[in-house]
Image: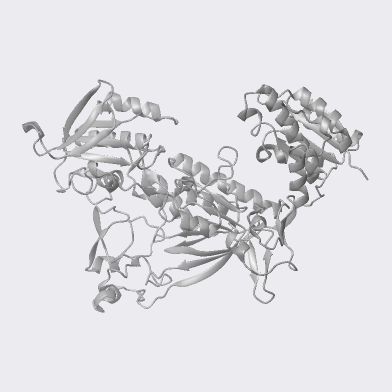
Amino acid sequence: MSERIGVYICHCGTNIAGIVDVADVSKWAGEKLADKDVVVARDYKFMCSSLGQELIQKDIKEQKLTRVVVAACSPHLHEKTFRNACKGADLNPYLCELVSIREQDSWVHTDKAAATLKAKAIVSGGVARVMHHEALEPLRVPIHPATLVVGGGIAGIQAALEIADAGFHVYLVEREPSIGGHMAQFDKTFPTLDCSACILTPKMVDVGNHPNITLLTWSEVMKVDGFVGNFAVTIKKKPRYIKIEDCTGCGICWEKCPKKVVDNVFEAGMGNRKAVYVPFPQAVPKYPVIDDVNCTYYLKGTCKACEKFCPTNAIDFNQKPEEITVEVGNIILATGYDLFDARRIPQYGYGKLANVFTSLEFERLCNAAGPTGGNIVMRDGKTPPKTVGIVHCVGSRDKNYNGYCSAICCMQSLKFAHLVRERTGAEVYNFYIDIRTPSKGYEEFYQRLLEEGTRFVRGKVAEITSMARIPEEEGKLIIQVEDTLIGKQRRIPVDMVVLSAGMQARQDSKEVAKLFGISCSADNWYIERHPKLDPVATMTEGIYIAGCVQGPKDIPASVSQGAAAAARVLGKIQQKEISLEPVRASINQEQCSGCRICNNLCPFNAILFHEDTMVSEVNLALCQGCGTCVAGCPAGAISGTGFSNEQILSQIDGLLMLNLSRTAVPVES
């Protein structure tokens, strides 16, 4: 029985019609492809519009169409749209083929005649391919109502609270002893200058007390098995050496501990902590951790002061790491960012010149709970600076390091300038490439700094040195910069320099991405499904991203993305089951030789190997239909649904117009 195929050509405004003669392509398809079962061919200005979809649905019903080919934009953008249109007219949605004559034709050509000829070839290929389509049904997968959130910064906290408040259980995993992330280290937040701890701590307490949140700090995810709706996650709980069921958080243990070590994590090397400690006073949970690398007992077998003084006998030096497995339906990754290491730019003197500070060190200087009690002083711990230079874009917008903008450096630097003038009255210079203040209240904050008398020098700093040339530079740090607004080189002596270091992806981002089966960009940020239309989902179903794991962003954007990821997860949970694309790989076990090449090739870890039968099997819920295994199988035992040899070879014949009579093919001399 012959098929009845409808062909629909989209103008896409002038995106396609500006280069391709759409009417000619439509007419050609109706005439030249009539013997290939094409019974109707139409063109319309916007096929994706409601009227365009209704046109297809009307023809399906009236013309009794059994196949549909739409020549428009990328399938990545509108394939679902046209499949749903077919479904609305009771035609199986997988009997629709969308071919791209925009991204692959009109947008890449300027020769109208050649572009029109190419569009005809693309349509011909689509018609040849759709003949071999099969009616498919989506895979139905139940959704476990629990969710795993990895990362206890502000984005992870927001996501966890949104889901927990909706009545569903959340496991929140954080590798540090307390949640809070980088935001807990800050003094003020721009542009409103709110106390960072004052707005963060209530949310941290809510997480710690929430009946629907299991808080797993000082823990790391070790293994992720399963698929969307049914993940089994193995979590390693590192030993605190504290029995939390007995600990009251009274603080006697760290008061009595005689061992002090430099705190390179929370205090950014600016202060000390004890060998048994909580990172900061508002830490959640309140339970301390014993640093077994620096604790005297683990080094020498002596001391045990904390154990002697603990009133509840909560110290346990024999605790071991513990692994637990939790079952969840969805996972949100909110593991944050690392600060750019300013030592990588040796000409800026960080690590060599005492009074050159990083932005995080300066945050701790400003913080009332920091090592100086909020007093802005130089490295000697007592002398306030009289002149301060703040360098923007350290490690960002630089082809030698990171070419991207870190989004927060300008506003962070403006905040620092305000705090310096407010607390010390010092003269402040801001050295910037461009001032970028795009969000609500940001430009007004910049104007406020101008009115306060902050000096702005436009130009990239070349060098920071202590080598004086004139008596006025003695004992100072000299900032060498080209002031592009006056076109001159300048040497500006200051007492203190703050390097506004940019954001970069966490150093273990590639390993974490591999663990969860997602991808990283060239800069190691996690890749979203679509940068504009789906910025919180990943290409792996059930895995979402939030906050700075996707790229540099400020606190409001991180909170928004955390809430957005939670909303996506709640939508899945409330459905109780989801439909998955049936385009998946399958293995003919009779042909499988057990070579296991496909197991190593699969980027989604979707192929299992059965040791008893010595053959591989595809987990359909994990498979994303990418086709890597199909191409890699030396035995040809793997086929891809929707991408069979017949479909691919027929489409190639159609593209070459081998499926037409020779008289239908224009031949150029």
In the rendered image, the residue lying farthest to the left is: 471
Q: Is residue 537 visible?
A: yes
Q: Toward the viewer: 361 or 531? A: 531
Counting from the top left corner in percent of width and height, residue 17 is at 70, 23
In the rendered image, the residue lying farthest to the right is: 1
Q: Is residue 253 left or right of residue 137?
A: left
Q: Which quadrant of the view contains residue 106?
A: top right
Query: Where's the N terminus, which quadrant?
Result: top right
Q: Toward the viewer: 558 or 90? A: 90
Q: Toward the viewer: 310 or 393? A: 393
Q: Is residue 85 visible?
A: no
Counting from the top left corner in percent of width and height, residue 161 is at 52, 51
Query: Where's the C terminus, which quadrant?
Result: top right
Counting from the top left corner in percent of width and height, residue 557 is at 48, 40
Q: Is residue 314 above or below residue 652?
A: below
Q: Which quadrant of the view contains residue 402?
A: top left
Q: Is residue 357 above or below residue 635?
A: above
